[in-house]
Image (spheres, rainbow, N blue to C red):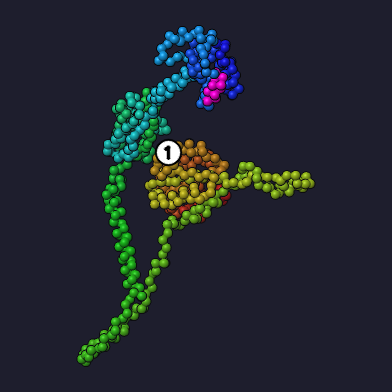
Amino acid sequence: MDDLPLLALFTRLREAGFPLGVDDYQAALEALQAGFGIGDRAALARLCRTLWVKSEEEQKLFDYHFDRTILPETKPSTAPAVNLVPVAEQLTSDQPIPEALSPRQIAATVGIYAFSVGIVVLPYLLSALVGRTNHYPIFISQPVVQANYGKPYEYKIQAKDFDAGDTLTIEAKIWLNRQTYLISEQGIEADETESNLPNYSNWLRFKDQGNGTAVLFGTVQRVENSEEQKRADSRYRVELQIKDQHGGSDLQSFEIRAMDSEGRPFHVLWLLLIYAGLPVIVYLIYWRSRTSSAKASPDSRAADPPTAPEPTNSPKQGSEAADKDRDVSAAPQLPSTLPIMSRSSFRQTTEYFPLTRRQMKQSWRFLRRMVRTGTPTELDVEATLNQISRQGMLLEPVLVPRRANQSRLLLLIDQDGSMVPFHSFSERLAETAVRGGRLENANVYYFHNCPMDYLYGDRYFQQAETIDEVLNTVQSSYTGVLIFSDAGAARGTLNAERLELTTAFLTTFKRRVRYIAWLNPLPSARWVSTTAGQISQVVPMFELNRRGLDEAISVLRGRFR
């Protein structure tokens, strides 16, 4: 075996750039000793190619150097390796001669098999892992938010869980006195120490059917002369929670409003009929006005017809005609042209007088508290000159932060009830304050009659926030509170309960806010002997006009006297 020019071939391949080492040469020798590649020249080439060649380019170089190093045999070989021919003779001519693999090739082969198995098994593992992920249950039903006095209320609750086989449990809670209580088929579950709950609120019943469905039902009754029910404004806040056995949950919160069935709006069909006939009515009015103006216009009058010749009359008829002429000449004559009101005398406008949208924006821009904050970027001329006079030269300018408006507004608007005629004005008041006031921050909240426990972030009383939560966001040094309400002046009576609740609310706000003003849409003459007149002694109250809004903003700036 030592007579074979294997070392010469190995050396030439290394010089040609093959990445071969001592281990590769030792592997070839061990394979030859094991009986591989000794049959003929092609077997040796196949063995060396298997161990040393890794690409097509290396194979071409290997064939080139192999043909010039291992020459073809011209006579039987006398090399000691020929003694191993009997081992090869035991193989049939049809069987391929096995060849030994190096440890590197074995490791590569095992790695390829492991990678292939991993590609096949990995999707099943991922699907098994994903299958064990818990999906949270969700509510798929929409709550019923209206209940009529004396009529059954029912909300069929439906929930869905994408994990088949999960057990779903639904609970119902109601908010009373700033606390939550569970609702069961018997009613509200309260302890003996909590027996002071109002009776009118214990009308809801709840039943969990155990299959992802439940029902919330009951009949609300009006309690005569119940002051607590009036203060609660017949609103009941309910929370539904669904859970599965893995800890996944979902929450649905809504507010049920009790009202009289007679107070419902017109039927939808009547509304459609009114909307369908409205264009026809408008067109008839427009056509009638055009016809009237055409008849009254002097240009539209036709020319006087030519006078016919007077017929010959008898003496009697002539005297009668003369009498008629005297009567006509004695009657008062109307002027030939009457003054006609032109359409240009009227102008269509969407402004809400006595305060327009433009005037609102101009007034809001006076609500300014200029404070220097941020990075010093503005030159302080006076301080720079003083520094030069002290140091005798200009070493560096004195910079100060820019002045920025830090005013914050909290606008509280009374909604519904006697404030319905002023909805258009309240909407524009809130819009101009938020968008056109150029304030640092402007928040708008809504209430009904007087704020009690909650303020609402929308006009439909769906986004409830407690008064404490609103006060936590208020900075007393830069925040002003403007309340827009009639304060009971529209009813013309003095309501002691409303006065007490409003005074308590204002006292709570005055602890955190320094500047509070009240804007009343009714004139001051209507405040006398009403709740509004008493509230005006607690906080400054102004009428709904340009002067009143300017004075209210002056109060918020701390400059009203």
- Helix, strand or loop for the magenta stretch, by majority: helix
> What residue lies at 56% left-to-right and 51% top-to-bottom?
561
Residue 551 position within the rendered picture, expressed as x and y whole percent measured from the top left: 53, 52
Q: Amino acid at mark 1?
A: Ala
Q: Secondary structure at mark 1?
A: strand
**Which quadrant of the structure image shows residue 343?**
bottom left
What residue is disc 1 on?
Answer: 464
Residue 3 position within the rendered picture, expressed as x and y whole percent measured from the top left: 57, 12
Residue 509 position within the rendered picture, expressed as x and y whole percent measured from the top left: 50, 40
Above or below for 70 versus 277: above
> Could one spot residue 529 in this view of the protein?
no
Q: Residue furthest bottom?
A: 315
> What residue lies at 48% left-to-right and 9% top-to-bottom?
85
> What residue lies at 47% left-to-right and 56% top-to-bottom?
356
Span shown in magenta? 60-70
Q: Residue furthest front?
A: 75
Above or below for 101 versus 297: above
Above or below for 478 versus 173: below
Residue 275 position within the rendered picture, expressed as x and y whole percent measured from the top left: 30, 54
Instruction: Categorize mark 1 by other alpha carbons within 10 Å: few (<14), some (14-19), many (20+).
Output: some
> What residue lies at 27% left-to-right and 49% top-to-bottom?
269
